[in-house]
Image (spheres, rainbow, N blue to C red):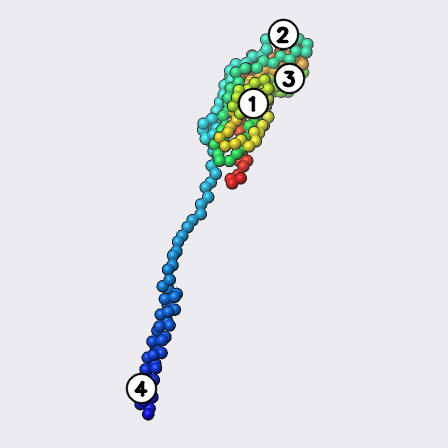
Amino acid sequence: MKQNSKKRIVPMLFALLVVLTLVSCCFLGSTFARYTSTGTGSTEVKVAKWDIDFNGSNTENGETDIEIGKLSPDDAAWTEGLNRVHVIDNAQVAMAILNKSDVAADITVTIGAAPVFYGVDGSDIAGWSATGISQGDSLPSYLEAYSTIQLQFAITNGSAPDGSTLWHNYGASVTQYDVATNGGVYVWVRAVWDTMDDFGQITSDAIDTWLGQNVTSVKCNLSYVAVQSSELPA
């Protein structure tokens, strides 16, 4: 009897094993045999170019010297109420500042507040009078020289200065806002001899004469700063 029972158990165990095997294969096929795909990607942002071209040098630290020429006082005789001013008419481009960036720029141009006056020996003049010729001294003050011989600049978008152009004197700072890509500004310079006629004929002529005899040149710094003024994307 026991023998027959054992004989029936063996086929049942075998059948159960087959069923479990089939079930296991179904699950394995469902989990690991499906079509699968994997991939990778990337993200990228391009940097907007910042490129300010200073007289073709592509640098913020470009430097150039502009010699304007020789300047003298006006040759007219002193007359009550006349303000004698003599200007070198051939204004020259001192800077061509071009914005080659992908963004706009604010460009500020500044002329130095302290011009240097050079004497006949080539060195800068230091022995100015504390009071000046207008106060009875034989030497002019630095203020008298500063007010008489002036270096000035103007900014345009390319055209030469005309009668409506604004000229800026020592210490001035001017900003052109939002200079567009591929746009630019041109900085012009000139020299002016503004005789101090308000002091009268003798004093004004004495100041002009001393400067003509003792000053060989006047030099002043001219600088610029370009600052980003737009962004990408807008």
Q: Residue 132 — which label?
A: 3
- Disc 1 versus disc 3: distance between alpha carbons? 30 Å
- Disc 4 versus disc 1: distance between alpha carbons? 115 Å
Residue tagged by mark 4? 7
Q: Amino acid at mark 4?
A: Lys
- Disc 4 versus disc 3: distance between alpha carbons? 136 Å
Instruction: Locate residue 112: give its quadrant.
Output: top right
Image depth: mark 2 or mark 4 in front = 4
Of pointers 2 and 4, the one earlier in the residue sequence:
4
Q: Is residue 231 left or right of residue 80?
A: left
Across and down, in percent, residue 171 comes to: 59, 25
State the quadrant of the N terminus.
bottom left
- Disc 2 versus disc 4: distance between alpha carbons? 145 Å
Q: Amino acid at mark 2?
A: Ala
Image depth: mark 2 or mark 3 in front = 2
Disc 4 is placed on an element classified as helix
Q: Residues within 10 Å of mark 2 (few under 14, many from 20)?
A: few
Say whether marks 1 and 3 touch (CB < 8 Å).
Answer: no
Of pointers 2 and 3, the one earlier in the residue sequence:
2
Across and down, in percent, residue 145 comes to: 60, 18
Rendered position, 40 above or below 85: below
